Image (cartoon, helix red, strand yellow):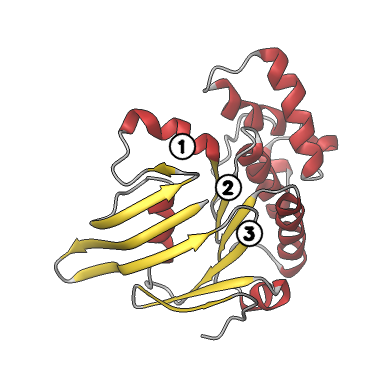
Amino acid sequence: MIKLHNVSKYYSKDSVALADISLEIGSGEFVSVVGQSGTGKTTLVKLIIAEEQPSHGKIEVGGWDITRIPQRHIPFLRRQVGVIFQDFKLLPKKTVFENVAFALQVSGTSRKRIKEVVPRVLEVVGLKQKETRYPHQLSGGEQQRVVIARALVHRPKILVADEPTGNLDTVNTEEIIEILKKINEFGTTILLVTHNRDVVNRLRRRVVTLHGGRILADEKVGKYRL
């Protein structure tokens, strides 16, 4: 599903974000990527979603070589790869329904299809009863649920979550992780980038540890060891 072959990313001669990374994540896996700040986690995410291109190596996502993907093809990639960030980036003047629907509208989806899909994904994240609320009327955990719903509207094969619980308390963190686990049970591949030790240790799933831009460890049932 995701394959990196000897991938390196240099921002300058003295700034190496990733150095000769090789990694394979299979369909339906739930993988946590951990490591201290500045170790290459965010760069890895940016490469997988084609926000940046590698300096060397090859990247495949869903059987598609995205190493030097043309700009015009990136929207098609983003329909295969849903992304959740720490900062919610919701549109403040749009309701929950409208925020989620917007992701479909920009891709030319019909109104009929939008009316079918949006309630469905809101039900998955437990927000069907709050579709008329605005972002300022929601808790941080609820706002992150809207972000997850928005990422799910194109039924992506892969969901990349970059520090999705970084701004949340313990209760909301647990709820978001449970939603991600449920989405994974539907068959979606989950790549969770996090610094939350408790989350990683409770998941008891595969853990890839980055250190100094390299893979320090890759454990099938891992723990946060740094």
Q: Determine the residue positioned at 75% across, 65% down.
A: 174
The residue to which callout 2 is attached is 158
Q: Which mark is residue 197?
A: none
Marks 1 and 3 close (CB-CB < 8 Å)? no
Location of residue 145 with respect to 191 vertically, above or below: above
Q: Determine the residue positioned at 37% across, 43% down.
A: 65
Location of residue 211 with respect to 76 vertically, above or below: below
Q: Amino acid at mark 3?
A: Glu
Q: Nearer the viewer, residue 60 or 175?
A: 60
Q: Determine the residue positioned at 46% across, 37% down.
A: 77
Location of residue 131 with respect to 147 vertically, above or below: above
Q: Nearer the viewer, residue 144 or 63?
A: 63
How packed mark 1 is, by other alpha carbons closer than 10 Å (few <14, some 14-19, many 20 or more), is some
Q: Nearer the viewer, residue 85 or 62?
A: 62
How packed mark 3 is, by other alpha carbons closer than 10 Å (few <14, some 14-19, many 20 or more), is some
Disc 1 versus disc 3: nearer the observer: 3
The span from disc 3 to disc 2 (Cα, nearest Å) is: 9 Å
Marks 3 and 2 close (CB-CB < 8 Å)? no
Q: Which mark is residue 29?
A: 3
Which residue is the extreme one toward the bottom?
Answer: 225
Q: Amino acid at mark 2?
A: Ile
The span from disc 1 to disc 2 (Cα, nearest Å) is: 10 Å
Can you see residue 127? no
